Amino acid sequence: MAGEEIIRIMCPNLGCQRVLAVPSSARGKLVRCRGCGSNIRIPANRPSASDGPAAANPAKPATPAQHKPAA
Ligand SMILES: [Zn+2]
């Protein structure tokens, strides 16, 4: 069952930072923060928690450790 997914996004307003729960159908749209009333854009891509350091590395071929002779 691929039902609606709930996306949690934090309000970017530093004075608010309220966590909003919006349905996945709101991706790419603007929702209004109920805390401060500012519009927040829901990212269209899925916010994955595992999207960490690996994202910093572009598609790079895995190079084996090269043993360089000390000069
Ligand atoms: Zn807010």
Image: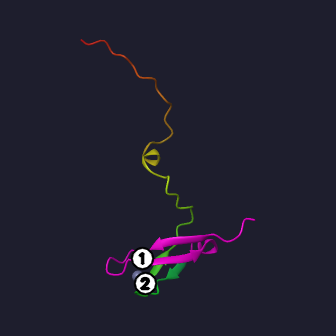
**The magenta stretch spans which residues?**
1-29
* Quadrant holding the C terminus: top left
Given residues 58 and 67, the one toward you in this image is: 67
Mark 2, ligand 1, within 8 Å: the answer is yes
Q: Which residue is mark 2?
A: 38
Would you say residue 27 sits in the magenta stretch?
A: yes
* Quadrant holding the N terminus: bottom right
Would you say residue 35 sits in the magenta stretch?
A: no
- At label 2, counting other C-alpha atoms closer than 10 Å, the crowd grade (few under 14, some 14-19, many 20 or more) is some
Q: Which mark is residue 11?
A: 1
Q: Percent x, y for residue 26?
A: 60, 75
Mark 1, ligand 1, within 8 Å: the answer is yes
Q: Quadrant of residue 10?
A: bottom left
Q: Earlier in the sequence, mark 1 or mark 2?
A: 1
Q: Which mark is residue 66?
A: none
Q: Amino acid at mark 2?
A: Ser
Find the distance from the CA under tag 1 to the CA under tag 2.
Answer: 8 Å
Q: Quadrant of residue 11?
A: bottom left
Marks 1 & 2, CB-CB < 8 Å contact: yes
